Image (cartoon, rainbow, N blue to C red):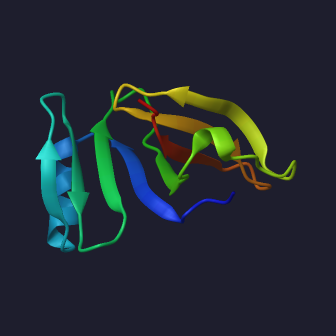
Amino acid sequence: MTTEGIEAVFLTTHNWGKAAKFFQELGYELEFATDHNSGQLRNGDGPFVFIAEVPEDQEPQTRITLKVPDADAFRPDPVVEIVTPFEGTHYGTKEMTVRDPDGRLWSLQAPAKN
């Protein structure tokens, strides 16, 4: 089994309001905002952008998330370095972290089974 392509881009920022406004000016619409300086934006049928504010002492980061239809059936080739195996998230999915040959981290996300 392989991935189904890019599902989302996760960003951290020092200023949620400015980051959200930036993407809105680029044509993204706010789908929802949380009460803790984060939220999700979307532009058409493409991947969504989720932005979360972090403290000034943390460096802003970007993580691209690839969609996996079934975490239990996903068996990556050894060329894919698994950093963390699939684990449940607080937002109702399972997430795995992998590292590409250049050291970048990627998230793989699958639905949580009921």
Number of numbered discs overlaid on the protein picture:
0
Residue 30 percent coordinates (x, y): 13, 56
What residue is at 18 percent from the left and 51 percent from the top? Answer: 18
Residue 35 percent coordinates (x, y): 12, 29
Query: Does 50 sit left or right of 61 as displayed?
Result: left
Residue 113 percent coordinates (x, y): 46, 33
Residue 5 percent coordinates (x, y): 53, 65
* Residue nearest the viewer, comparing 63 with 54: 63
Instruction: Give the quarter of the figure containing the C terminus.
Output: top left
* Residue nearest the viewer, comparing 54 with 80: 80
Query: Does 75 sit left or right of 60 as displayed?
Result: right
What residue is at 53 percent from the left and 37 percent from the top? Answer: 95
Instruction: Give the quarter of the figure containing the N terminus.
Output: bottom right
Image height check: is 29 above or below 52? below
What residue is at 24 percent from the left and 70 percent from the top? Answer: 43
What residue is at 56 percent from the left and 27 percent from the top? Answer: 87
